[in-house]
Amino acid sequence: QVQLVQSGGGLVPAGGSLRLSCVASGHTFSNYGMGWFRQRPGKEREFVVAISWNGSSRNYADSVKGRFTISRDNDKNTVYLQMDSLKPEDTAVYYCAVDPSNSIWSVQGKYAYWGQGTQVTVSS
């Protein structure tokens, strides 16, 4: 079965950086797009960024454009989220997910499998 295991969250001051990782198993990772979502306190889960199967296409939410970078290493079955210039409003639980259609959707209903979530807390 498909499994996504996340790591890399934590507490960071505003302006700092963190890198999240998501290691996939149980499917041919390089065939599928991947996405990152987040759920901020008291809010619904929202789209952050997506990447196509080969990394050639990316789709960023406006709120993170220019600060966050998604990348993937298909040899390691891993997708990364580099988060720079973090703000307190980036505080959330972050989730990686598999996009079976490889269409870099921003709609979470298009994603089939989800990681366990990683807490990111940005202090002011």
Image (tube, grey):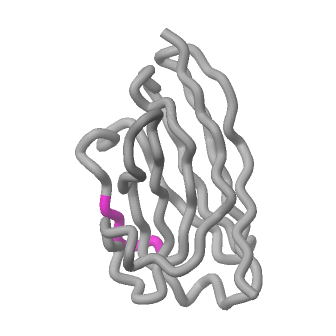
Left or right: residue 101 versus residue 18 is left
Residue 92 position in % (x across, y down): 51, 37
Relative to 13, residue 29 above or below: below
Farthest residue toward the top? 124
Q: Is residue 62 visible?
A: yes
Q: Which residues are magenta?
A: 55-59
Residue occupying image coordinates x 46% and y 79%: 99
Residue 122 position in % (x across, y down): 54, 22
- Count of numbered badges drawn on the protein: 0
Farthest residue toward the left? 62
Residue occupying image coordinates x 50% and y 71%: 34
Question: Quadrant of the rendered structure where residue 58 is?
Answer: bottom left
Relative to 40, residue 3 above or below: below
Left or right: residue 118 versus residue 14 is right
Left or right: residue 92 versus residue 76 is left
Q: Is residue 53 visible?
A: no
Majority secondary structure of magenta residues: loop
Farthest residue toward the front? 42
Relative to 14, residue 63 above or below: below
Residue 45 position in % (x across, y down): 42, 52
